């Protein structure tokens, strides 16, 4: 059976693109999201520094959690933290209530992301996180929300409006949360004195890792001296191939003239003649 395309999608596929309208919408989206990030920068203050200090003083690991689009942003934040010197991992908010809470231990810092700050799956975790002795950082768009009020530190990621023309799809809000997470990760990187060499250790497969961290021995399985000897022997053999019989004739002429040659030279000359 052929796949059926919903009528609304079929109509959209058949519709011609209005270049002027499409470009105007794209520019409006970018402008809205850029404005949201600019507004975040202007609001940064003591809570951001408090979140930074809480993570720097963390005796365990940083656990990042969210659901939906905020969950995708949370997963990216955990990856960025882990690759820039802050041990971190992602826990899905729904899975946490079904056993993954066991991944969170006393001394951990839990960063929860939710634009509304009222995501049921995250709110229901709060008493369990507090019982475990984990510190909580909430990154939300509502400072009066349940998550913001219960957290040890609240990071305000509110936006004036979504970039979506329907006002429904998370767009400016997820961009703001992503940017604020990056700001936190890179401020931590700087505070830890994390270097390019440190970065390379967790990125052995990337171009930066190969440039900064890979040694000759990692590539060839030989030490540097062994590699040099191998290359020199190759060049000597190549030279002998080029000289071929001329070298053999030179050895014979020298011996006939009464010169005492090393055994290696005589053996090499004999070998070339036999060829």
Image (tube, rainbow, N blue to C red):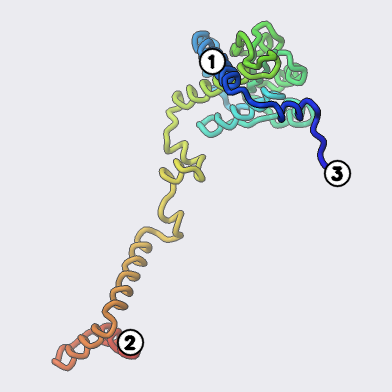
Q: Is residue 187 left or right of residue 251?
A: right
Residue 61 coordinates in the image, percent (x, y): 60, 29
Q: Earlier in the sequence, mark 2 or mark 1?
A: 1
**Can residue 50 be seen by looking at this rendering?**
no
Q: Is residue 66 above or below residue 256?
A: above
Q: Is residue 45 left or right of residue 148?
A: left
Location of the C terminus by quadrant is bottom left
Element assignment for label 1: helix
The image quadrant that residue 123 belongs to is top right
Residue 250 coordinates in the image, percent (x, y): 20, 86
Residue 254 coordinates in the image, percent (x, y): 17, 88
Mark 2, mark 1: which one is toward the viewer?
1
Q: CA distance from mark 2 to mark 1?
A: 78 Å
Q: CA distance from mark 3 to mark 2?
A: 74 Å
Q: Earlier in the sequence, mark 3 or mark 2?
A: 3
Judging depth in this view, the residue of 171 and 265 nearest the camera is 171
The image quadrant that residue 159 belongs to is top right
Mark 3, mark 2: which one is toward the viewer?
3
Residue at the top extreme, as displayed: 144
Q: Is residue 204 left or right of residue 260?
A: right
Element assignment for label 3: loop
Q: Is residue 255 left or right of residue 25?
A: left
Residue under label 2, please give it.
271
Element assignment for label 2: helix
Residue under label 1, please give it.
31
């Amino acid at each position: 059976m052929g796949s059926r395309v919903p009528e609304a999608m079929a109509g959209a596929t058949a519709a011609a693109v209005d270049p002027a309208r499409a470009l105007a919408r794209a520019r409006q989206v970018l402008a809205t999201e850029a404005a949201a990030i600019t507004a975040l920068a202007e609001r940064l203050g003591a809570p951001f520094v408090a979140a930074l200090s809480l993570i720097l003083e963390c005796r365990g690991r940083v656990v990042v959690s969210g659901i939906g689009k905020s969950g995708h942003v949370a997963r990216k934040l955990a990856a960025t933290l882990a690759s820039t010197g802050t041990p971190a991992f992602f826990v899905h908010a729904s899975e946490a209530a079904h056993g993954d809470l066991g991944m969170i231990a006393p001394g951990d810092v839990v960063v929860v992301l939710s634009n509304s700050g009222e995501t049921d799956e995250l709110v229901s975790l709060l008493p369990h996180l507090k019982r475990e002795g984990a510190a909580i950082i909430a990154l939300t768009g509502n400072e009066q929300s349940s998550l913001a009020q219960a957290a040890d530190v609240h990071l305000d990621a509110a936006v004036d409006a979504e970039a979506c023309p329907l006002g429904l799809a998370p767009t400016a809000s997820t961009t703001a949360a992503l940017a604020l997470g990056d700001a936190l990760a890179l401020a931590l990187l700087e505070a830890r004195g994390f270097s390019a060499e440190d970065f390379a250790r967790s990125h052995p497969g990337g171009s930066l890792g190969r440039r900064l961290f890979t040694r000759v021995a990692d590539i060839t399985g030989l030490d540097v001296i062994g590699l040099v000897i191998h290359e020199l022997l190759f060049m000597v053999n190549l030279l002998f191939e080029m000289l071929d019989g001329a070298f053999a004739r030179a050895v014979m002429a020298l011996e006939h003239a009464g010169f005492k040659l090393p055994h290696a030279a005589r053996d090499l000359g004999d070998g070339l003649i036999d060829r």
